[in-house]
Image (cartoon, coloured by chain):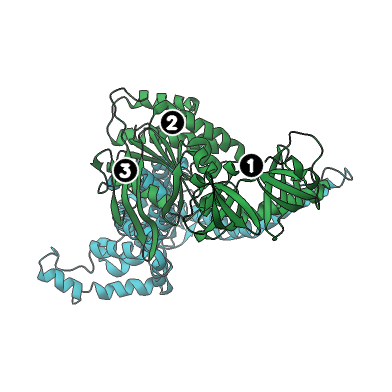
Chain colours: A cyan, B green
Amino acid sequence: MVAVVPTSGVSGAPAPVAQRSSRTGYLLLFPGIAWLAVFFAIPFVTLFLTSLQQPVPGKSGRYMFGLQFSNYSDALAEYWPLFLRSFLYAGIATLLALAIAYPLAYFIAFRAGRWRSLMLVLVIAPSFASFLLRTYAWKTILSDEGFITSTLNALHLLPEGRILNTGIAVVAGLTYNFLPFMILPLYAALEKIDPRLIEAAGDLYASPITAFRKVTWPLSLPGVVAGTLLTFIPAMGDYINAALLGSTGNRMIGNAIQINFIQFRDYPTASALSFVLMAGILVLVFTYIRRAGTEDLV
Amino acid sequence: MVDGTRQVEDLHLRSLTKSFGDFVAVDDLTLTIPAGSFFALLGASGCGKTTTLRMVAGLEDPTQGSIMIGDRDITALRAFERPVNTVFQSYALFPHLDIYENVAFGLRRRGVKDVRGQVERMLELVELGPMARRKPAQLSGGQQQRVAVARALINQPDVLLLDEPLGALDLKLRRQMQIELKRIQVDVGTTFVHVTHDQEEAMTMADTVAVMNAGRIEQMGHPAEIYETPRTVFVANFLGQSNLIAGRRTGVSGDHTLVEAHGLTLAVPSNRCFSLGTEITVGVRPEKITILDAVDAGRIPEGHNRLEGRVTDVSYTGVSTQYLVDAPWGQELIVFEQNVIVGDRCEVGDPVVLHWSPSHTFGLHPAQGGTAGVDPEAAEGARTAAHLLADGTGV
């Protein structure tokens, strides 16, 4: 922090001014730090300690302090297919959301004209209804007697004869629920692109498709990276969509954590799963950002 | 840059028209821009000059008319199919590519071989060799400007379009770049079409200037010719400053048309009189007028146009002194006097006589009104500056 102080005048005076302004900085940081300490750092440590607890001998369902690292290997051995499935579902949902959101965001940014604000409101509007409610709505939309399922069945397009309680329904729910988190960063990135850059590409012998590949797409990458992360991370840990729209065969890792915590009361296993999920996402995100090379983008 | 075999051809615009709804931006423009010339389209904002340029670039479709290079009609070609490149206003350099890749962009799109050699030569031409691996944001305004020129020129276009290329630079850099651009144009011999609202920029660089107003070309020619012999009130006011005095045709004396204005008789060479009716607006440039103390009136050469007045403002600008003189009928006239003799300037309130040679006089059709082409902000600014200067120095 730089304090601007007049150089003339009493030489002793500037010091307290500089001191106070740096103290103001810490004062302003305090609420945030306190919040993080109470609601993130402490629970984080507690969760980690829980994940290493061992059962109290003779009393089932009671745990005590320990360093039982086998909790991790046991949890992984039992639930690794759910990790894979979560990764698969979240990955497909993210790609689908990108495919749906990019043209939409492009249209809003470059073509919507005076409808731009209205369209942005429409993107956010569904969020006014609760997440849970919207997912229940999908249960109705995709139900076996519903219009979509019966139409697709009439066309013999559904191998399983239904959508609800299949992986398709879970992926559809995930895609729908996290779509706004894809659209908004994409819109923000596209909207910043100077349309003259696209004209300049055309002027320099780039056909519209080449201009998109060489100019628009690379310049929108920060939005693509932000949007995919904002979609993939929550989708990876989500359990509502799998619980409401999927069958037991479509459980995701979030469901396993939830069941271990709430139903089995197996806190060490649930905590270990949470930690593995967190670490896994961190590794994925870092590799992804490295590969996308966004630090280099303006 | 130009290989001997390459034929540079004229650019023809034929009845080019562009309307946006009811607004006609470019109105039936027919124009031939000679191959290898540095051509300036000069006009105030909204006069249609940028629209004209964008139509040539293929970024805007004409409502009517055609664009030809030599005898090839390029009207229907899309921007990326035209042998034309543009230096955009504020450059539009690709921020995610370095200087080298920006310059190489056009070559790569056309699959040209020897990209490296050409880019290096081009960067040398604009003196940016060592900057090749920097990003545009790391360059100064003047350097970015040169990258924009290099990126367009490397494609050896038949026509290079420049849209207000120096608008974003400060005055000193602008002067430097004017000379630089002219040098590059002479070097490569490509036709440059330059759009600007800055008359000084147009006059220093271009061999032909077209003054545009309301979608039409008011006058076109060599800069000196347009400046010395404006044919319309708009041109007289837009290009430099002019003193314009409304009058009526009274007769002819030899090669001169005589005009009666506010009781004075002023002579205009008949071949510089562009009004055929009785109403004639007599014009003279401020630097063509000599200002004399009223007592020295006897020194005025025979046959000069003359009028009496009173000095209302004097501002010393170093090279010259600018006088505002009130004519007897209340009109304010501007006079520039070179500061050749130190001291002995006229002062505010002095009765003076203004005189000038009839050969420097021009006669215009008054249809546009006396203030057409005057930039209201610039005129106001000049006046305020003159007053401030006068107050500050106590002249």
The amino acid on which the numbered mark 1 sits, given as a three-letter code, is Lys
The amino acid on which the numbered mark 3 sits, given as a three-letter code, is His
* First in sequence: mark 3 vs mark 2: 3
Q: Is residue B207 visible?
A: yes
What is the crowding at mark 1: few (fewer than 14 residues within 10 Å), some, or many (at least 20)? some
Q: Position of residue A106 (x, y in %)?
A: 35, 57
* First in sequence: mark 1 vs mark 3: 3
Q: Tag 2, which secondary structure?
A: helix
Q: Do marks 1 and 2 share a chain?
A: yes
Q: Do marks 1 and 3 share a chain?
A: yes
Q: Is residue A276 visible?
A: no
Disc number for residue B12: 3
> Where is B184 relative to B159, above or below?
above
The amino acid on which the numbered mark 2 sits, given as a three-letter code, is Gln
Q: Position of residue A200 (x, y in %)?
A: 38, 44
| Residue at the disc numbered 1 | B288
What is the crowding at mark 3: few (fewer than 14 residues within 10 Å), some, or many (at least 20)? many
State how far apart marks 3 and 2 are (Cα): 20 Å
Residue under the point 65% across and 42% down: B287
Q: Nearer the viewer, mark 3 or mark 2?
A: 3
Q: Nearer the viewer, mark 1 or mark 2?
A: 1
State how far apart marks 1 and 3 are (Cα): 37 Å
Q: Tag 1, which secondary structure?
A: helix
Disc number for residue B185: 2
